[in-house]
Image (spheres, rainbow, N blue to C red):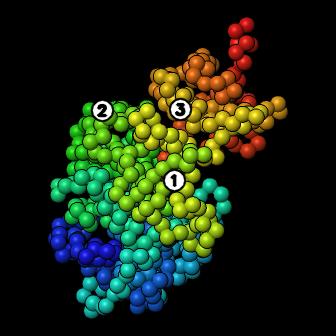
């Protein structure tokens, strides 16, 4: 049975053997080789004193050593702590100290930045050469047999306040997550998966497990390149991929190319597909795009089936997979989740864990609304409000209306201080190509809103932006919109006149 990640690796090696598993720019690794290399690397870690339950950090770029080290740490019975290679000083120190990592596996270029014990991938450095790949002829050693409920990863969340917290993710969590995704994509024997995110994020990790389940190759790009992404897809014959955050918009901004539809891609999974661009994406690249909604804490919560063509452009998040329940809080409209997969909790944060799971449901912090067909769509964050005088304004409601204007690609509403009202709403607007960022355009957008919203909900100011910074879950990062010390009423903001003044 494949109840743990090492079990899955061994099963894939025995089933798929010499078939290609991992494809990097300068090397290719079979299923058998990945199993053998990670076995020997696990043995080397044990020789260095790593014991079951220890936390071992991995800080590397997208190189073969990352997934092999992940598998090795788990085969040694330890817990992986993925570390972003861009971390420096405070971020890095916090993750290593908070997790209690006994060592960090890394490569030479990152070693100088890392405090504490460092094991270089090519030497497992202790002052004497000890090449990892020279261990291929070493004597196999007994490895730890994990349980499904054992923690596999401390996956740190970005968080909006304070330092990141570690989600304790078990072997069972990871296997269930990968199985849900495999079912969503209706995995086939001739599939080729391609990924461009950094391995320190959770997405390449569950994608790796999906490929172990299906016996298909995983193409790992060194980094995301908007100009090179579809060329890589053509080069490698990729049929599946996963994108999120700014990636879809960056791809969209690339000039149209005669070969845009010249690819084998049969499905793009995406978290946070912009409804206004959904059909455009599918038409341009000739393949379905389907939503995958979830979080680090809860894994996949809602998935859009491959055949759900009727939801394109609606913002619908999909349906709950087997084992998951999703509902809306009747009072707040917050999206609540329970079932499996689910994290064990936040490491060293019992109060935060209890708060997140109050009432027996995981509180996502996301607001949801159901359309006339009962389909759930994202409607902002739970505290995403403007209080104008005595009136509460849902930012998501206003943003949804603004985004329906033909000139608007996306919009974000934020509160700004006002001497009379306490707060008034300000709209940041990203325009579609071909529309000018002028006062006339701003007033057209406001007129559209006035025809659909109560007067107190109308933005008092409009400011056009070239693009929005997005969170890892593809939501607009609003804290970057309100720069400290800047007058939010000054140019380039456009003040919106009251209706009676506008008519004079």
Q: Do the residues labelled 3 and 1 touch (CB within 8 Å)?
A: no
Q: Are marks 2 and 1 in contact (CB under 8 Å)?
A: no
- Find numbered disc 1 in the image and state the secondary structure of the residue it sits on: strand
Residue 305 x/y as whole percent: 31, 46
Marks 3 and 1, the one that precedes in the sequence: 1
> Label 3 to label 1, Cα distance in Å?
21 Å
Q: Is residue 402 visible?
A: yes
The residue at 25%/76% (across/down) is: 1
> Label 2 to label 3, Cα distance in Å?
23 Å
Marks 2 and 3, the one that precedes in the sequence: 2
Residue 400, which numbered label? 3
- Crowdedness near tag 2: few (<14), some (14–19) or many (≥20) residues, C-alpha within 10 Å: few
Look at the picture and state if 375 lies above or below 43: above
Residue 114 x/y as whole percent: 55, 74
Which residue is at the front of the view, 363 or 12? 363
Q: Nearer the viewer, mark 2 or mark 3?
A: 3
Q: Mark 2 points at which residue?
A: 283
Q: Name the residue under label 1.
A: 336
Q: Residue furthest top?
A: 504
> Label 2 to label 1, Cα distance in Å?
34 Å
Q: Are marks 2 and 3 in contact (CB under 8 Å)?
A: no
The residue at 53%/69% (across/down) is: 345
Q: In which quarter of the image is residue 23?
A: bottom left
Q: Can residue 207 be seen in this view?
A: no
The residue at 27%/90% (across/down) is: 140
Look at the picture and state if 13 lies above or below 314: below
């Amino acid at each position: 049975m494949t109840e743990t990640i090492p079990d899955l690796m061994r099963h894939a090696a025995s089933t798929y053997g010499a078939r290609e598993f991992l494809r990097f720019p300068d090397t290719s690794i079979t299923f058998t080789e990945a199993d053998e290399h990670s076995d020997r690397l696990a043995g080397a870690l044990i020789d260095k004193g790593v014991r079951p339950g220890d936390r071992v950090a991995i800080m590397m770029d997208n190189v073969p050593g990352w997934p092999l080290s992940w598998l090795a740490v788990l085969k040694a019975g330890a817990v992986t702590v993925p570390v972003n290679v861009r971390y420096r000083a405070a971020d890095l120190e916090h993750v290593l100290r908070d997790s209690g990592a006994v060592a960090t596996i890394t490569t030479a270029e990152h070693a100088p930045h890392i405090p504490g014990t460092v094991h270089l991938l090519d030497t497992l450095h202790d002052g004497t050469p000890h090449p990892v790949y020279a261990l291929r002829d070493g004597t196999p050693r007994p490895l730890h047999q994990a349980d499904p409920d054992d923690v596999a990863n401390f996956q740190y969340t970005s968080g909006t306040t304070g330092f990141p917290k570690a989600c304790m993710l078990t072997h069972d969590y990871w296997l269930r997550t990968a199985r849900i995704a495999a079912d969503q994509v209706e995995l086939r024997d001739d599939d080729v998966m391609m990924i461009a995110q950094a391995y320190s994020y959770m997405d390449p990790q569950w994608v790796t497990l999906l490929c172990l389940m299906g016996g298909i190759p995983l193409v790992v790009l060194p980094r995301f390149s908007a100009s090179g992404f579809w060329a890589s897809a053509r080069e490698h014959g990729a049929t599946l991929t996963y994108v999120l955050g700014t990636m879809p918009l960056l791809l969209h901004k690339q000039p149209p190319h005669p070969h845009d539809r010249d690819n084998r891609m049969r499905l793009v999974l995406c978290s946070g597909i912009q409804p206004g661009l959904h059909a455009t994406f599918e038409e341009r690249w000739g393949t379905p795009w389907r939503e995958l909604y979830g979080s680090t804490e809860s894994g996949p919560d809602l998935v859009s089936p491959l055949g759900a063509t009727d939801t394109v452009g609606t913002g619908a998040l999909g349906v709950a997979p087997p084992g998951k329940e999703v509902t809306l809080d009747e009072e707040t409209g917050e999206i609540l989740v329970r079932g499996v997969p689910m994290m064990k909790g936040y490491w060293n944060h019992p109060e935060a864990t209890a708060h997140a799971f109050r009432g027996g449901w995981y509180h996502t912090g996301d607001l949801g609304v159901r359309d006339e067909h009962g389909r759930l769509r994202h409607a902002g964050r739970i505290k995403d409000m403007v209080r104008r005088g005595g009136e509460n304004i849902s930012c998501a409601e206003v943003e949804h209306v603004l985004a329906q204007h033909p000139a608007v690609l996306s919009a974000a509403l934020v509160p700004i201080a006002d001497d009379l009202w306490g707060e008034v709403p300000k709209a940041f607007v990203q325009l579609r190509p071909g529309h000018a960022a002028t006062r006339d355009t701003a007033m057209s957008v406001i007129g559209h809103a006035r025809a659909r919203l109560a007067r107190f909900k109308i933005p008092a100011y409009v400011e056009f932006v070239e693009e929005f910074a997005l969170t890892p879950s593809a939501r607009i990062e609003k804290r970057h919109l309100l720069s400290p010390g800047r007058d939010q009423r000054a140019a380039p903001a456009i003040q919106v006149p009251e209706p009676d003044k506008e008519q004079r």
